[in-house]
Amino acid sequence: MVISLLLLASCALSHAAQPFIRYGVEWGSSGTLFTAKHQNYTVGEGYRVDENHAGWTFIGNAQILADLGVNITPHIAVAAYTGLAGIAEGFRVIPLTMRGTYYFREMDCDGMLCYFDGGVGFKELRNPSKICTLLSAGTGYHVALSRSVSLDFLFSARASLDRPDIVDPDSGRKIPESSIRLDQASYYSLNISIALNF
């Protein structure tokens, strides 16, 4: 009985020592491997243009992120991320996403993890309405350097869904919303990164 109580007390102290608030930085590189774009709009005297193309490519980018969140249980953490991320050539965003991470072992142990991440990317600070959707899922290996410091090696797949501006190739002017029937662009990438969490 005494041994059981001591074990329970030890477990409680161990969990209590795990920090509730977490923060960290993450940096890495990404490769956009597939892009797709479909735009349908009217120009001039009602002339309709339909552009639809997709294909494999490689566009290298980088990202640096900072996060702030909470450790809900010894296995689950939720955090908000922001920073700077490259999506495609000449296309960078300031992401604001929420990530849920599951650790297959407790956070103060080394082991595998998986996570899901979703939110928006701001394309222009002066115009917050110009955003794209960011969705990603990943896995990785968690190295517990101490009870409150860890290093994560991450691999993920990301989908970036955008509605880019359409410019009339003849006049160089932006096509107004009233003349656009369809405007979709998507970018699919693989990402590797390293995260340091406290």
Image: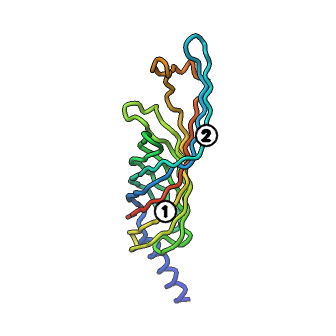
Name the element at disc 1: strand
The relative height of residue 5 versus residue 143 in the rendered view (above or below) is below
* Residue 158 image offset from top left, x and y in percent: 54, 50
Residue 177's x, y, as percent? 54, 21
The numbered disc on residue 166 is: none
Of the 4 image quadrants, the one containing the C terminus is bottom left
Task: Compare residues 99 and 34 and report the one nearer the observer.
Answer: 34
Where disc 2 sits, the SS reads strand
x 42%, y 67%: residue: 151
Q: Residue at x 51, y 32 (%)?
A: 164
- What whole-number distance in Å separates the C-alpha atoms at marks 2 and 1? 28 Å
Q: Quadrant of residue 49?
A: top right
Please state which amino acid type lies under the numbered disc 1: Leu
Tell how many labels.
2
The correct choice, above or below, for 196 with respect to 168 in the image is below
Residue located at (42% from left, 57% from top): 28
Q: Residue 162: x percent and y percent? A: 53, 37
Q: Quick one: label 2, few (<14), some, or many (20+) residues within 10 Å?
A: few
User: Looking at the image, which is closer to me, 148 or 42?
Assistant: 42
Q: Which of the marked residues, 2 or 1, is nearer the chain's N terminus?
A: 2
In front: 83, or 6?
Answer: 83
Amino acid type of the residue tagged 2 in the rendering: Ala
**CB under 8 Å between callouts 2 and 1?**
no
In this figure, which residue is indicated by the disc labeled 1?
154
Q: Which residue is mark 2?
A: 54
Which quarter of the rendered picture does the N terminus lie within? bottom right
Measured as percent of width and height from the top left, residue 155 is found at 51, 61
Relative to 174, residue 6 above or below:
below
User: Does the rendering let one see residue 182?
Assistant: no
Label 1 environment density (alpha carbons within 10 Å; few <14, some 14–19, many ≥20): many
Q: Is residue 106 visible?
A: yes
Location of residue 148 with respect to 35 vertically, above or below: below
